[in-house]
Amino acid sequence: MDIKELKQTAVENGLCKKWTERWTDDWTEKDLIAMIMSFDGIEFIAKKNFPSLGALERATKNLAEQNDLYIKKTNDIKLKSYTYKSHFVGCKCNIDVPDFYVGIIYISRGSDVVVKVGRDCDIIVKSTIDCNVAINDYPFNNSTVKSVNLKKDTENEC
């Protein structure tokens, strides 16, 4: 599925008007990643299960991980300390959170992950109900971790 086909399918799945109008025919992988990693984009692909994991992986293969989008990963992932948000899609892995990390971790598409929290972190973990998320946060870490379920919905909510 190329980027034009992906747009058509996204619109059919309820892509909001704001992103439908912004998404032009000359979009590149970089433009697509920017949309996917926006807060609206992350929640759209998490809640709508769109696009398929294969299509998402193919459309973002060159830039996904450097933009903190992890698709079908099975190896341990260490977040970068300067990352504000990351998204794990269909992953079966450990997520190592560095000391002093502040940010949001999105987990979706049946991911099975263990979030290992460093010291003095402030984290929100948002996951869809189909995920298995274990959070290893120890009292002496002096970290704050909030876990939130992303509810699937049919709203067009950009």
Image (tube, rainbow, N blue to C red):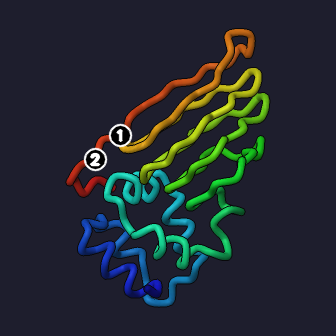
Q: Which residue is mark 2?
A: 152
Whether 58 is drawn above or below 25: the answer is above
The label nearer to you, 1 versus 2, is 1
Around disc 1, counting alpha carbons within 10 Å, would you say few (fewer than 14), some (14 to 19), or many (20 or more)?
A: some
* Residue 5, image quadrant: bottom left
In the picture, measured across the screen, residue 59 lies left or right of residue 44, that is: right
Residue 7 rendering spot, x and y as whole percentages: 37, 79
State the quadrant of the N terminus.
Answer: bottom left
Q: Amino acid at mark 1?
A: Ile
Residue drawn where x is 73% and y is 16% of the image = 141
Residue 92 rendering spot, x and y as whole percentages: 57, 49
Q: Are marks 1 and 2 in contact (CB under 8 Å)?
A: yes
* Residue 14, image quadrant: bottom left
In the picture, measured across the screen, residue 79 lies left or right of residue 2, that is: right
The image's mark for residue 129 is 1
Please tell me how many numbered marks the rendered image carries: 2
Say which of 91 and 104 sits in front: 91
- Label 1 or label 2, whichever comes before in sequence order: 1
In the picture, measured across the screen, residue 128 lies left or right of residue 155, that is: right
Around disc 2, counting alpha carbons within 10 Å, would you say few (fewer than 14), some (14 to 19), or many (20 or more)?
A: some
Whether 87 is drawn above or below 26: the answer is above
State the quadrant of the C terminus.
Answer: bottom left
Residue drawn where x is 42% and y is 78% of the image = 23
Residue 104 rendering spot, x and y as whole percentages: 57, 39
* Residue 94, image quadrant: top right
At numbered mark 1, what does the secondary structure look like: helix, strand or loop? loop
Residue drawn where x is 62% and y is 34% of the image = 115
Q: Amino acid at mark 2?
A: Lys
The image's mark for residue 64 is none
